[in-house]
Amino acid sequence: MQIFINDSAFEVPEKASAEQALVTFGAKPPFALAVNGQFVAQGQYQHLALQDGDRLDILSPIQGG
Amino acid sequence: MSVEELSAKEQIRYSRQLMLDGFGMDAQLRLKNATLLVVGCGGLGSPALMYLASSGIGRLRLMDDDLVELSNLQRQVLFKVNHLGQPKAKAAAKVLASLNNEIAVEAIVTRADANNLDELVNDSDLVLDCSDNFATRYAVNRSCYAQKKPLVSAAASGFNAHLAYFDFRRAASPCYECVFPEREDNPSDNCATQGVIAPLLGIIGAQQALLAIQCILGTGETGVVHSYNAHTLGQKQFKLPKDPDCDCCGK
Ligand SMILES: [Zn+2]
């Protein structure tokens, strides 16, 4: 199935977890993950089964200002 | 001691706000009676403060222990060549006082930390985090949470920025650490190491000012994180639930 991570399309297996998608993307901690516009707590990454068309956003903390 | 009317001059100065639908005298008086603590008078603090001062926030307290440097002038639009070497908080206070002589502006030339924040935060209606380092961000978040004061937090580096409003007067509000928990491996990148595109600070600092005004008027939405991309000019919004395991606001 196809999902989107930071607006780019990725192929992942059916019912892949958010954690698997993060590995596919090569996300480097620390980051926050939002799925379809809502943040997901880190403890839920491995339990959250993704669906076709899900939109993931990975946000790295920023300190500047 | 809240002020309950505007002078004739103030009515002219703020006329373009007073005529706004759903704004009016009551809203302007709320701004006039508000005290804001702004932590950091740099890239974000500059535009945020200029709009907050010109809009008529009655009392602005500026906290920063840095001095104005030549490399600041690319984006910290409060400062001019003649401010080089001066404490940012003091130079900013002078500029803002000349921008609006109807408001009170106070410079606090001190680095914000866990020891000095609580009293200042408690004496404010709202806090803006315009700082440039994680240690200050976590200290400001914790103090605002402890004192139950609303916080408008923003950060910018490179071509990316984040912006969020946390209304700690509501028990259900999440906090900064719910989205970015304190970690030893937090990135060390900042504007000095990574650079930052100047107008990004204007875009985000102005939004901080807008969120601050919304907060004072009671219309801001708590627990929404905005992410801005200066390459695409795209801004995304994410809902942030309170994390029950958060070190700051969780159980
Ligand atoms: Zn929290």
Image (cartoon, coloured by chain):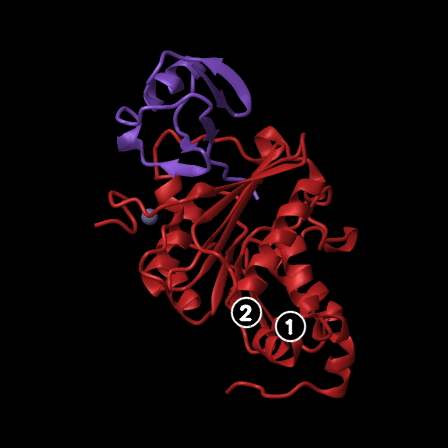
Indicate the amino acid at tag 2: Leu
Q: From this viewpoint, is residue B112 visible?
A: yes
Chain B on-screen colour? red
Q: CA distance from mark 2 to mark 1?
A: 9 Å
Residue B144 pos. (x, y %) = 39, 59
Pick the front one: B104 or B155: B155
Tags 2 and 1 touching, CB below 8 Å: yes
Residue B210 pos. (x, y %) = 61, 58
Pick the front one: B220 or B37: B220
- For label 1, being within 8 Å of ligand 1 is answered no
Please state if B15 lies on the left or on the right of A44 as rendered.
right
Task: Classify 10 Å Cα crowding around label 2: few (below 14), some (14-19), many (20 and above).
Answer: some
Q: Is residue B95 above or below residue B156?
A: below
| Residue that appears at 46% across and 37% down | A37
Q: Is residue B1 above or below residue B149?
A: below
> Residue under circle 2?
B217
Indicate the amino acid at tag 1: Phe
Residue A24 pos. (x, y %) = 41, 13
| Residue that appears at 39% across and 23% down | A51
* Marks 2 and 1, the one that precedes in the sequence: 1
Q: From this viewpoint, is residue B108 visible?
A: no
> Residue under circle 1?
B23
